Image (cartoon, rainbow, N blue to C red):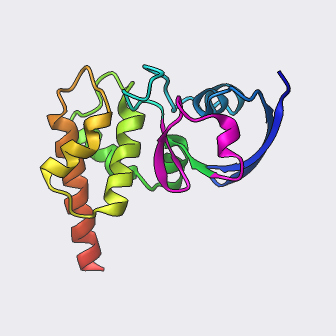
Amino acid sequence: MTAVAISLTVNGEAVAALVEPRLSLADFLRHQLRLTGTHVGCEMGACGACLVLQNGRAVHGCLSLAVQADGAEIVTVEGLSESGAIADLQAAFHRRNALQCGFCTPGMLMTAQELLQHNAEPSREQIRDALSGNYCRCTGYEAIVDAIEATAQARQTAESAA
């Protein structure tokens, strides 16, 4: 197969690469850019472990091809973490014991961040609905919902104070 040239922005950095047309975005991020926070679980778009933000919206990296991200802005869990954008979410996950083995955590954080960007005061039901595309085999979800709810409330309190 002939490699295809792509250019995109990943975590604020310009990236140019040659990729095989059938290379998934998740594999591109993990193997070529060494951004291993994007996990590959089911490879069917069902578990949410591979979620990244593409132009501000969560997409399954296992179902998206790297060539489809040409010209896009991609943000991985590493980018959100390094920028401090999810420091409060990470702390809440830690406090609420919502990370257990950690395999699903990057996808959960991506989902939570996208949810809170679009809905600053989600109900517990809305949080559960947002998480419906993320599988966790360890926590039973209540701790994750608690952490996201606590973060939303803390962000609202901080915004009101500002």
Q: Residue at x 45, y 23 (%)?
A: 44
Q: Position of residue 124 (x, y in %)?
A: 14, 49
Magenta stretch, residue numbers: 51-72
Measured as percent of width and height from the top left, residue 78 is found at 53, 42
Residue 85 appears left or right of 158: right
Residue at point 30%, 27% (across, down): 135
Relative side of 25 to 8, left or right: left
Assess whether residue 74 is covered by the magenta stretch: no
In magenta segment, residue 62: yes
Quadrant of the drawing holding the C terminus: bottom left
Residue 103, percent from left and from top: 39, 24
Q: Is residue 68 left or right of residue 103?
A: right
> Which quarter of the figure has residue 117?
bottom left
Up-down: is 25 above or below 149?
above
How far across and down, in percent of the image, does residue 67 sit? 70, 38
Judge by depth and name the residue closer to the eye, 42 or 29.
42
Could you say which quadrant of the image residue 116 lies in?
A: bottom left
Q: Is residue 137 left or right of residue 46?
A: left
